[in-house]
Amino acid sequence: MKFSESLKSYRQFQSVYKSGKSYADKYLVMYVKENGTEENRIGISVSKKVGNSVVRHRVTRLVRESYRLREAMFNSGLDIVVVARKTAASVGYSQIEEALLHLAKLHRIIRV
């Protein structure tokens, strides 16, 4: 990811969950909070409810790649947490990418 870092600590995720705004669709939930810097930070959360480790890592890779390829479209200065829902385990790349862009449009954090 060229312009973005990762959210890593529990405290960073909790900050976004508590004071960020969220929108959800069939496959993903997206929390967004301004971070006051020039860079975006993204965190991806996939719980054990989604599936075993192979499935969870696959969903994580799909979300990360969807974001990476469209990263230039996103506004900067944001903390973004993407939470995968159980239904995300059975879909492909195009549906995940479509869900990510749809949520970004709802948040108004994407340049079209």
Image (cartoon, rainbow, N blue to C red):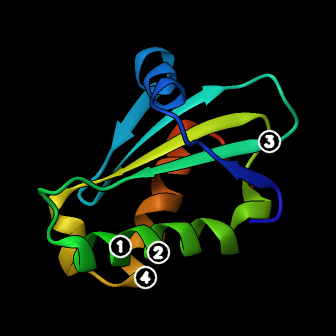
Q: Secondary structure at mark 3?
A: loop
Q: Residue tagged by mark 2?
A: 61
Task: Tell me if label 2 and label 4 are in contact, CB under 8 Å.
Answer: no
Left or right, 96 with respect to 90, comes to: right
Left or right, 17 with respect to 50, comes to: right
Q: Amino acid at mark 1?
A: His
Q: Is residue 112 visible?
A: no
- Within the image, what quadrant is residue 67 found in? bottom right
Task: Tell me if label 3 and label 1 are in contact, CB under 8 Å.
Answer: no
Using the image, tell me which numbered label, if any, was put on residue 10.
none
Quadrant holding the N terminus? bottom right
**Is 59 located above or below residue 107 in the figure?**
below
Q: Residue tagged by mark 1?
A: 57
Q: Residue tagged by mark 4?
A: 94
Q: Position of residue 88 (x, y in %)?
A: 24, 68
Q: If you read the primary sequence from the N terminus, does the residue marked by circle 2 or circle 4 appear first?
A: 2
Q: If you read the primary sequence from the N terminus, does the residue marked by circle 3 or circle 1 appear first?
A: 1
In-front residue for pair 5/74: 5
The CA distance from mark 1 to mark 4 is 17 Å
